[in-house]
Image (tube, rainbow, N blue to C red):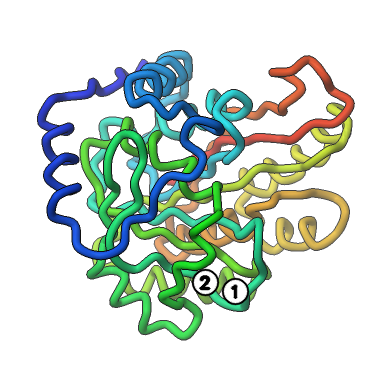
Amino acid sequence: MIPVRGTFPERETVRTQRRAIVAGPIRKPIIAGSWYPGNPTTLKETIKSYLDQASIPDIPDAPVAIIVPHAGYLYSGQVAAYAYKSIMNHDYSTVVVISPSHRAFFPHVSLWARGAYETPLGLCEVDEDLSRKLLSSQIIRDDSKPHAGEHALEIQLPFLQMALDSFKLCPLILGQQDLVTCERLAESLYKHIPHPQDVLVVASSDLSHFHSGPKAEEMDARVAEKIASFDIAGLSKDLESTYAEACGGGPIMTSLLYAKKLSRLQTKILKYAHSGHITGDTSSVVGYLAAVIY
């Protein structure tokens, strides 16, 4: 059992100092108090409870990426905790969170390039050095607009703040999720991250939407199998068809492609569930998966 790191006074001090000295725009939380608790104490207790209940196998190496759901914590927080449990007791200087866009289509990858994201637990300062490097790529743009209303990136940050002692953030939103876009983003990350052992990639994705429980489990098993076998081309084909669904298929494929470039080819599916397991209503559910790439 991996112990949950405590919330130490010095961590709170660091966050307070960052709040005072971070220059640039602050992306305020938009789903605190609805999708997850807005009260800092309640939020910490909620996440700690999820982490305490998550039991994972030994992971022999530090994860290079994790795949996590992005529904409200009531529905997918426990599943997400399995992935976040796998990064505890590891140190990362930067976390790249890759989110799909639920509200707009655009032909590039949107980067919040300066300042910070804020949650009830404090600021997640942007890694502006990495931002400058990534912006030399034609596919990545300094574009804050898609971040304004997107939940799938913000929902990951309190878990990261609880699981890691400190980190800088690289927040990316995919405006389109085809395999070519994912390959270009993975190549840019590979090219511009000088010390990949110090960087974690977080792929934010739910799975099938609004099918019966049995149908969702059938569809989601295909996604899990493709992740487990590192079959990126097969995953792309399934997502383009009606065989499988993942609203963050692009982030998942990007994380696999990036890990492949690093020759980090091991995966583990840590947990699967769907919303029917929480609500008891299996007539129309959403699927959630937690996985680690190492």
Residue 45 point in image, percent of width and height:
37, 17
Q: Quadrant of residue 208?
A: top right
Expressed as whole percent of the image width and height from the top left, the position of residue 117 reads 35, 51
Q: Quadrant of the N terminus?
A: top left
Q: Nearer the viewer, residue 122 or 191?
A: 122
Amino acid, disc 1: Thr
Q: Please give left or right for residue 119 compared with residue 156 in the image.
A: left
Q: Reply above or below: 229 against 4.
A: below
Mark closest to the chain's N terminus, 2 or 1 = 2
Judged from the image, the secondary structure of the residue bearing numbered disc 1 is helix
Residue 116: which quarter of the image?
bottom left
The label shown at residue 181 is: 1
The image quadrant that residue 249 belongs to is: bottom right
Q: Is residue 232 above or below residue 151?
A: below
Q: Is residue 198 visible?
A: no
Which residue is depicted at the point 80% across and 62% down?
A: 240
Residue at (77% x, 49% y) in the render: 245
The residue shown at (52%, 71%) is 109
Q: CA distance from mark 2 to mark 1?
A: 8 Å
Locate residue 159 relative to residue 151 in the image: left or right. left
Q: Please give the residue where the numbered disc 2 appears in the rendered image.
A: 109
Comparing labels 2 and 1, the label whose residue is closer to the camera: 2
